[in-house]
Image (cartoon, rainbow, N blue to C red):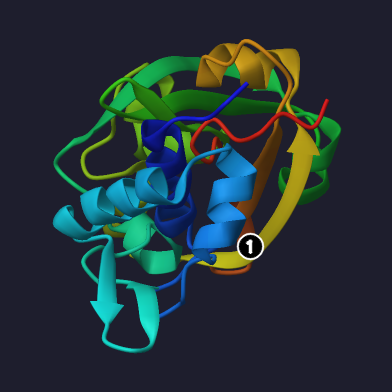
Amino acid sequence: MAGTVARMAAYLRARIDLGTLEPGNKIPPTAALMKQFELSDNAVYRGIALLKAEGYLVSHQGKGVFVGDRRKLIAGESRIAGITQGKSEIIHHKLSARVQAPDWVAAHLGSGECVNRVRTVQRGDFVLQASQSWVHVDVAELVPEIDEPKACDPSWQALYQDRSGNPVKAADKTMDARITTAADREALDLDADFAVLVMRTVYVSGNKVIGVGEGVYAPGHPLSIA
């Protein structure tokens, strides 16, 4: 089944938003994009022109097309400060509930109860990211807002830092890939299995881990490898 210009553009936007294509990086060659998305060269050029108009890409005469520097990635302390990637993105908070920590979370937070917060980030009709955080129950003593299924203003990390007087840092960050789970497909509004990028972050205040997060990114409804 042939691809579409919109699909190719969404794929490149998601890679740029995620950071797998960084400002200054050269985008994949036209021939590679034609093959991946089963598009004509003219269709690829239209998609690139659209992304240029949006500020995602820039051309350098005689050198090619590169990622622009119009946006800042949500990462590290920028994430803690609650910075979003653009006014066109909408965050939907789905859930906040007390749960038993999954094994990989317990390895950081310790076993027992924690607060699980679930949200998605949407741009237009495209669900860009589905994320969860698991927050140590001690945080709720200072930030009771984490038990409510709505946004903390500006973020639970920033509120905890302000109220405790202890800096919160993203102490560890790992990137991996996996085939979508049933929960991933539901959250990202996918109707088939895809390869998705997964970022996990550990938040530390002082010598204590106070939360972990997992973001699952759908890079433009990528090609199925099932």
Out of 68 and 34, give the one closest to the viewer.
34
Front residue of this view, candidates 137 and 226: 226
| Residue 9 in sight in this render | yes
Quarter of the image containing the C terminus? top right
Q: Residue furthest bottom?
A: 62
Q: Is residue 151 left or right of residue 3?
A: left
Q: Secondary structure at mark 1?
A: strand
The mark total stands at 1
Q: Is residue 83 left or right of residue 143?
A: left
The percent coordinates of residue 179 (x first, y second) are 78, 31
Q: Residue at 66% across / 34% down in the picture?
A: 223
**Taking 194 as reference, is 221 left or right?**
left
Disc 1 marks which amino acid?
Lys
Q: Residue at x 32, y 20 (%)?
A: 125
Q: Position of residue 82 (x, y in %)?
A: 28, 51
Q: Which residue is mark 1?
A: 173
Q: Quadrant of residue 168?
A: bottom left
